[in-house]
Image (cartoon, helix red, strand yellow):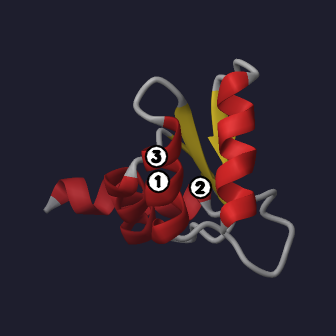
């Protein structure tokens, strides 16, 4: 946890536009907890990308509520279909 916080502080100090949770290629992926922590660390002036593990609209909405401004998802077609269905209701 401390290493993650330090990495985000360094990225902010270096002038990065956004930070991200993971590459999406590892065994884990983005969690709501990770996104919320990043948002607290970097503040509102930086973007936060939730990458890996976002597989449906509900997970996407939870990530955005936690502070994500970008989403990396290989399930984007499924998410778009779910969004379209939800908007019909």
Q: Is the Cβ of the residue at disc 1 closer than 8 Å to that at disc 2? A: yes
Q: Position of residue 62 (x, y in %)?
A: 36, 64
The CA span between labels 2 and 3 is 23 Å
* Image: 55 above or below 10: below
| Side (left or right) of 53 relative to 48 | right
Please tell me which residue is depicted at 63% across the width and 32% down the height of the picture.
Answer: 18
* Image: 65 above or below 75: above
What residue would you read off at disc 3? Answer: 39
As drawn, the residue found furthest toward the bottom would be 27
Front-lying residue, 37 or 70: 37
The CA span between labels 1 and 2 is 6 Å
As drawn, the residue found furthest toward the left would be 89
Question: Can you tell which mark lies on residue 76?
Answer: 2
Asked which quadrant contains residue 26, the reply is bottom right
As drawn, the residue found furthest toward the right would be 25
Which-is-in-front pick, marks 3 and 1? 3
Front-lying residue, 87 or 12: 12
| Side (left or right) of 87 relative to 57 | left
Regarding residue 53, the answer to whether it shows in the image is yes
Please tell me which residue is depicted at 73% across the width and 78% down the height of the picture.
Answer: 28
Regarding residue 74, the answer to whether it shows in the image is no
Q: Position of residue 71 (x, y in %)?
A: 57, 48
Question: Can you tell which mark lies on residue 80?
Answer: 1
């Amino acid at each position: 946890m401390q290493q993650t916080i330090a990495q985000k502080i360094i990225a902010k100090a270096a002038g990065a536009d956004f930070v991200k949770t993971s590459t999406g290629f590892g065994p884990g992926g983005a969690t709501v907890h990770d996104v919320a922590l990043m948002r607290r660390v970097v503040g509102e002036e930086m973007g936060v990308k939730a990458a890996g593990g976002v597989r449906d609209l509900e997970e996407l909405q939870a990530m955005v509520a936690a502070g994500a401004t970008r989403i990396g998802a290989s399930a984007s077609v499924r998410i778009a279909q779910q969004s379209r269905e939800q908007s019909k209701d």
